[in-house]
């Protein structure tokens, strides 16, 4: 007969098999418990990738300044912080004509966790949330230099407008 301990082990293995393919990504508030870990994630990016996104420390300082607009969140894989996203939920600061939209102001996944489908899951979660809030428009801008995330955003359904905002290409998605 199977011992209770082996039953538990078997149950865990079965749960893991059932969950395989399901990505356990959550977006969580920045708190005293995770702020330093989120800041440190920027150090994992290559020099080229650091040209594509501001350091998380800068983003968090801006979130403090734009407290009424910014929506900063840590990206968690189960209980591990693996990335950072920040929305401008009103799109008032960057683009006054899209008041009922949201702007994906910052996004990064730490180097060791890239290309595993987690960024895709983050966008899916954001789109679902923004739709439930009645937002109609989701905008992102992308640098075009080495390692550009343009193709990543296009794969998630953002459309290339061909327009530049400073050095960055503007992409959008109707929600
Ligand atoms: C861009 C970034 C957020 C993508 O996150 P990720 O978790 O690596 O992306 P995913 O694994 O979910 O990729 C989803 C798809 O996009 C593709 N993709 C991801 N990054 C890409 C890139 N830079 N160029 C082209 N394709 C890319 C993946 O190959 C995958 O394709 P598939 O669905 O055909 O298999 C991440 O690479 C990152 O943090 N980069 C550095 C910072 C950065 O550029 N931030 C964006 C600033 S606007």
Image (cartoon, rainbow, N blue to C red):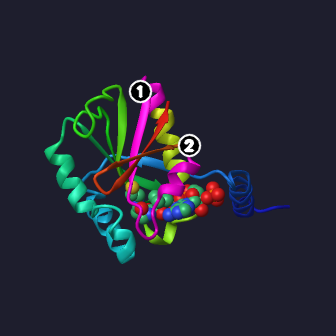
Residue 37 placement, left or right of 122 = left
Q: Position of residue 62 (x, y in %)?
A: 19, 51
Q: How many residues crowd around disc 1 within 10 Å: few (fewer than 14), some, or many (20 or more)?
A: some
Q: Taking the image as drawn, is residue 117 in sight?
A: no
Residue 104 placement, left or right of 20 = left
The residue at the far left in this view is: 65
Q: Could you tell which of marks 2 and 1 lies nearer the N-terminus?
A: 1
Whether 76 is among the magenta residues is no
Q: Residue at x 42, y 36 (%)?
A: 138
Question: In front here: 78 or 82?
Answer: 82
* Label 2 beta carbon within 8 A of ligand 1: no
The residue at the far right in this view is: 1
Rendered view: 95 above or below 60? above
Quadrant of image for the N terminus: bottom right
Question: In front here: 25 or 174?
Answer: 174
Q: Taking the image as drawn, is residue 69 in sight?
A: yes
Q: Position of residue 10 (x, y in %)?
A: 75, 60
Instruction: Determine whether the residue tagged by mark 1 lies in a helix, strand or loop.
Output: loop
Q: Which mark is residue 50?
A: none
Q: Position of residue 66 (x, y in %)?
A: 17, 42
The residue carrying mark 1 is 135
Question: In front here: 51 or 76?
Answer: 51
Q: Which residues are magenta?
A: 130-157
Q: Position of residue 41 (x, y in %)?
A: 35, 67
Quarter residue 100 falls in: top left
Q: Residue at x 27, y 36 (%)?
A: 95
Question: Which label sits in the foreground, 2 or 1?
Answer: 2
The residue carrying mark 2 is 157
Q: Residue at x 28, y 61 (%)?
A: 54
Rendered view: 44 above or below 108? below
Q: How many residues crowd around disc 2 within 10 Å: few (fewer than 14), some, or many (20 or more)?
A: some
């Amino acid at each position: 007969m199977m011992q209770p301990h082996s039953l538990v082990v078997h149950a865990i293995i079965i749960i893991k098999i059932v969950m395989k393919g399901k990505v356990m990504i959550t977006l969580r508030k920045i708190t005293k418990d995770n702020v330093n870990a989120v800041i440190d994630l920027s150090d994992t990016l290559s020099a080229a990738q650091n040209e594509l996104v501001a350091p998380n420390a800068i983003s968090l300082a801006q979130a403090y300044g734009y407290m009424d607009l910014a929506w900063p969140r840590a990206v968690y894989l189960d209980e591990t912080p693996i990335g950072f996203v920040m929305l401008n939920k009103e799109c008032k600061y960057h683009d006054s004509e899209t008041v009922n939209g949201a702007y994906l102001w910052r996004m990064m996944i730490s180097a060791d966790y890239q290309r595993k489908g987690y960024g895709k899951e983050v966008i899916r979660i954001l789109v679902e949330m923004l739709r439930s809030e009645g937002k109609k428009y989701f905008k992102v801008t992308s640098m075009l230099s080495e390692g550009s995330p343009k193709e990543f955003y296009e794969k998630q359904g953002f459309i290339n407008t061909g327009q530049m905002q400073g050095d960055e290409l503007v992409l959008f998605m109707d929600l």
